[in-house]
Image (tube, rainbow, N blue to C red):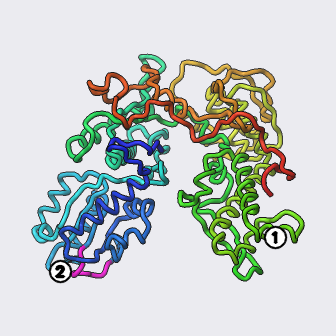
Amino acid sequence: MSFDSDTSSQGGDHRSFLQITRDRLLFEMLRSTRKNSKSTWKVLIMDKFTVKIMSYACKMADITEEGVSLVEDLYKRRQPLPSLDAIYFIQPTKENIVMFLSDMSGRSPLYKKAYVFFSSPVHKELVAQIKKDSSVLPRIGALSEMNLEYFAIDSQGFTTDHERALEELFSENAEGSHKYNACLNTMATRISTVFASLREFPRVHYRVAKTIDASTMTTLRDLVPTKLAAGVWNCLAKYKMTIPEFPQTETCELLIVDRSIDQIAPIIHEWTYDAMCHDLLCMDGNKYVHEVPSKNGSATEKKEVLLEDHDPVWLELRHAHIADASERLHDKMTHFVSKNKAAQLHQARNGGELSTRDLQKMVQALPQYSDQIDKLSLHVEIAGKLNNIIREQCLRDVGQLEQDLVFGDAGTKEGVSRENKLRLLMIYAALNPEKFESDKGAKLMQLAGLSDDDMIAVNNMRCLCGPDTKKSTGGGFTLKFDVHKKKHAHRKERTGEESAWALSRFYPVLEELIEKLSKGELPKDEYNCMNDPSPSAHGLPTTSSLRTSPAHSMRSRRTGGTWARPRGSDDGYSR
C-alpha cells in the first residue's frame, strides 16, 4: 500500500512516511527512555517481527546514536547485564509477555530496569498478568503502546507482512477457518497503526459485497473488504480516545478493496523500470547481485546492492517506462562523459564508444566521480539485461497481445514461452471465467502444455471472481491467441491520454478508483463509507491536509515519441 506523503494534518509536516516511522522509533521510543534512566547505554530487545519493523526504518548506526549498545533477540539465551537498562520493543502476545516476565522477575533479573513498548494495543489481561508479579512492577520504567506494526518499505509505501492472505481469505477452505478472522483482525490492527503514526483520521471507504440476487448467500470471501473496514474503523475509534493529538474529525481518505476488482494487474507484464526489475531479474526482495571490476582490474567480483531510496538514480527512474528509463540512462552517461575531461581523453584515444566497463576502470583513480559512476553503471547494466530479456522472449509482442485481450482488440502470437502462456491464459480466465467452467477450459490448457500446477493457478482465478450477472461477450480463443473479430473491451481506453511509449495503455483499476475518490465520484451502490463525514465537513472536508485534486499516477503519460528511438544500436537504448 502506498500514499501521498507530502501532506499531513499536523501543520505542514513534509516528512516522508519512512522518515515519520524512523523518527517515531528513534525519538518517541528510544530517546524517551533517557529522561528517567541512569544508564548511559541500554540493551534493545525485540522479537522476530519487531526486528523487521526496525530494520526497514533504521540503520544500526541510528540505533547506536540513541544510546543502544547491544541488540538482542527476545527468544535467544542472553547474558545477564544487571547494571544496564533494557528497552523492549515487542508484540503484545502471551508468549512475549512470558519471556519478558522471565527476564525481569525474581531476585536476579537480567537487567536493571525495563522500558516496554508494544507494537500494537495490548489486551488488559496481559497487562494484569504483568501487574501480578510484584518483583517485576518496580523494575518497569515505562509500559507504552507504540502502535507501530508495519514495514515501511520505502518513502511512501508499507506492507503488513501477510504473504498467505490470499490463501487464508479467498481459498475454498476459508469458510469457517480460524485463520480467516485472525488474518483480518491482524491486518486491521496493522493498517490502523499506520494512521496512528501519521496522526491522520481517515474516512473509511470499502467495496460492498455483491450478490447475484436476494436468494444468493454472501460468502466470507465477498465480505473481506467489509469486515476489514469494520476492523480498521474500530481501531481508529479507540485511537480518537487514547492517542494524544489524534484528529477528532476526518483528515484523509482510505479505500479498502480486494483483488476481485482487478485480477489482471498482478499478471500482465508491467513496463515500468521497477516492475521489470522484480519481474525479469533474479532479485531477492530489493537485493540485486552484479559483477564489478576488481581493484586490480584483472577480473570481476560479485557485489550485492539494494535498489532503494538511498540510490538517487533508482529513485528518479523506478516509475519510468523501461524504454524511457533506458534513454535517460544513456543521456546521463553521455552527460557524464561530456563533463569529465579524463573520460573525453580516453574516448579520443580509443576513437570509439566509451563502454561502461571502461568508465568503471577509468574512474577508480578519480574518487570524486566513483560513487556517481558506480550508480550509473549499475543501472546501465540492469537496463541492458532487461532489454536483452525483452528481445529474447519477444515480450513486446506478448505484452501487445496481453493488452489487446484487455482492450478487446484482435491479436495473434505463436511461439510463446510456458510462463507467458500461463499469464495469457490467466488473463483470459479472469476476463471470461465462464469459459473455464466446462471441459473447454481444461482442453485449452492441455493444448497449451500447462502443467498440473499451472492449471490449478488458472482455475483459481475463478475463486477471486465476484458474482456477476453480466456474461462476457468475448469471442473464441485458441492456443495461438488468434482473435479475428473485434471483442467486447473489458477495460476502457483513457481518453485524452496519448502515451509516449508503446504498451502503456493498461492501467490498474485502482488508479481509476482513487481518481474518482478524490473527486467524490465513487459509485454509491458499489462503495460504502464506514464513517459519515463530520457535520463541519459538508461533503469533502475542509481540512487543509486533504487533497481535493485528482490523484496523480506515478506512471508518466507524455505525448509524442515512440517505443525505442534508434540510437545507433539494435535495441534503441544505450550500449
- Give the CA distance from mark 1 to mark 2: 71 Å
Could you say whether the residue bearing mark 1 is in a helix, strand or loop? Answer: helix
Of residues 537 and 464, which is closer to you in this image?
537
Left or right of residue 532, residue 331 in this image: right
Left or right of residue 546, residue 277 in this image: right
Q: Which residue is mark 2?
A: 108
Query: Is residue 82 inside the magenta stretch?
Result: yes
Q: Going by the picture, which residue comes out furthest to the top?
A: 214
Q: Are marks 1 and 2 in contact (CB under 8 Å)?
A: no
The amino acid pointed to by label 1 is Leu
Image quarter hosting the C terminus: bottom right
* 10 Å crowding of disc 2: few (<14), some (14-19), many (20+): few
Residue 373 visible to the viewer: yes
Of residues 443 and 262, which is closer to you in this image?
262
What are the residue bounds of the magenta stretch? 78-85
Give the prevailing secondary structure in the magenta stretch: loop
Q: Which residue is mark 1?
A: 345
The amino acid pointed to by label 2 is Ser
